[in-house]
């Protein structure tokens, strides 16, 4: 099992780098050329979502991407460290929701689930993880 | 690869030609451009996406935002796109029902319904 790991500061300009690295490793792993566009888009969506969550929560830790070459499949894990609890302001009042940001987050997940057959989304108090995998030919 | 934007007027339509990658980093530039056009009174927009190499949900969000803005002025926002990989993103998100998508700028400019 060969792995390439990428950690990047939660900044929008690094999402493109993550897409390029993921596509390069996927190609090397034997993911079909026709599917590489989907890999690129899916990993971009997952990273965009993670960057948004880190920025919204003021988290300075990097976003983690693991590109894992397994037997007959290639997996990508995108992890964030944004806790999934109800966000509250300092006075204990719930923070007002940003409806536009919320919609974009959902659209990102909609794109991922529309693109990738094998996808798991999990979250806990320590953060979230999106795991996606594709079959490989070699 | 960055985002390139240029605008031109064809009759009562404003054509926005977009090139490059529309993602979380570059989408704010497209948003600014669309907002600026609407603020300047251009309510009938044609967004030409033939030279777009990459589009993600952030870009879709900006286009939906643009549509909301022009509709507030009884305007229109039409897309020009023939690229299968870009069209696929509109299909899986159901946005083909929201945007009129044309095969050429000429067709989009001539469209009235």
Image: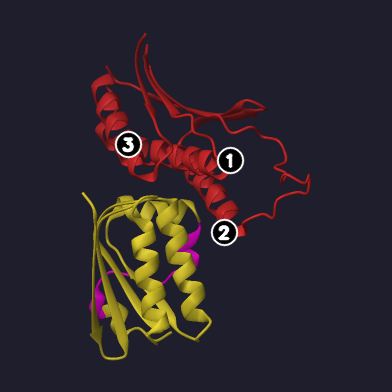
Residue placed at 25% from the left, 33% from the top?
A33
Of the numbered discs 2 and 1, the one sitting upstream in the chain is: 1
The circle drawn on residue A108 is: none
When the figure is inspected, residue B30 is found, relative to residue B39, above or below; the finding is above
Front residue (pair B14, A50): A50
- Chain ID for red: A
Please check the rendered image and state whether residue B97 is part of the magenta-colored stretch, yes or no. Answer: yes
Asked if the residue at tag 1 contacts the one at tag 2, i.e. Cβ–Cβ closer than 8 Å, the answer is: no
Query: Alpha-carbon distance for marks 1 and 3?
Result: 23 Å
Q: Residue furthest bottom?
A: B11
Single out the mark in the foreground, 2 or 3. 2
Query: Alpha-carbon distance for marks 2 and 1?
Result: 16 Å
Asked if the residue at tag 3 contacts the one at tag 1, i.e. Cβ–Cβ closer than 8 Å, the answer is: no
The circle drawn on residue A57 is: 1
- The residue beneath circle 3 is A19
Which residues lie in the magenta part? Answer: B94-106
Looking at the rendering, which quadrant does residue B14 occupy?
bottom left
- The residue beneath circle 2 is A100
- Chain ID for yellow: B
Residue A4 vs residue A89: left or right? left
Front residue (pair B81, B36): B36
Single out the mark in the foreground, 1 or 3. 1
Q: Residue furthest front?
A: A91
Residue placed at 53% from the left, 46% from the top?
A110
What secondary structure is found at the residue carrying circle 2?
Answer: helix
Residue A6 vs residue B53: left or right? right
What secondary structure is found at the residue carrying circle 3?
Answer: helix
Task: Give coordinates of residue A40: x percent, y percent.
Answer: 34, 38
Discs 1 and 3 carry the same chain letter: yes
What secondary structure is found at the residue carrying circle 1?
Answer: helix
Callout 1: chain: A
């Amino acid at each position: 099992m060969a792995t390439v790991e990428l950690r990047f500061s939660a900044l929008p300009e690094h999402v493109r780098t993550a897409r390029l690295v993921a596509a390069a490793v996927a190609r090397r792993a034997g993911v079909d050329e026709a599917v590489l566009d989907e890999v690129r888009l899916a990993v971009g969506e997952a990273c965009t979502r993670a960057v948004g969550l880190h920025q919204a929560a003021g988290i300075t830790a990097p976003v983690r991407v693991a590109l894992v070459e397994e037997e007959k499949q290639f997996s990508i894990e995108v992890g964030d460290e944004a806790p999934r609890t109800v966000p509250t302001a300092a006075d204990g009042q719930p923070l007002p929701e940003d409806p536009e940001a919320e919609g974009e987050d959902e659209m990102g997940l909609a794109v991922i689930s529309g693109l990738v057959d094998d996808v798991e989304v999990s979250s806990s108090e320590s953060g979230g993880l999106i795991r996606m995998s594709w079959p490989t030919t070699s | 690869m960055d985002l390139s934007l240029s605008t031109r007027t064809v009759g009562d339509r404003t054509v926005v030609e977009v090139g490059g990658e529309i993602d979380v980093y570059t989408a704010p530039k497209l948003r600014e451009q669309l907002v600026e056009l609407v603020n300047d009174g251009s309510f009938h927009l044609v967004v030409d996406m033939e030279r777009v190499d990459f589009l993600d949900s952030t870009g879709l969000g900006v286009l939906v935002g643009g549509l909301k803005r022009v509709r507030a002025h009884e305007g229109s926002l039409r897309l020009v796109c023939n690229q299968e990989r870009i069209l696929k993103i509109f299909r899986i998100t159901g946005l083909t029902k929201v945007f009129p998508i044309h095969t050429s700028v000429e067709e989009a400019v001539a469209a009235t319904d």
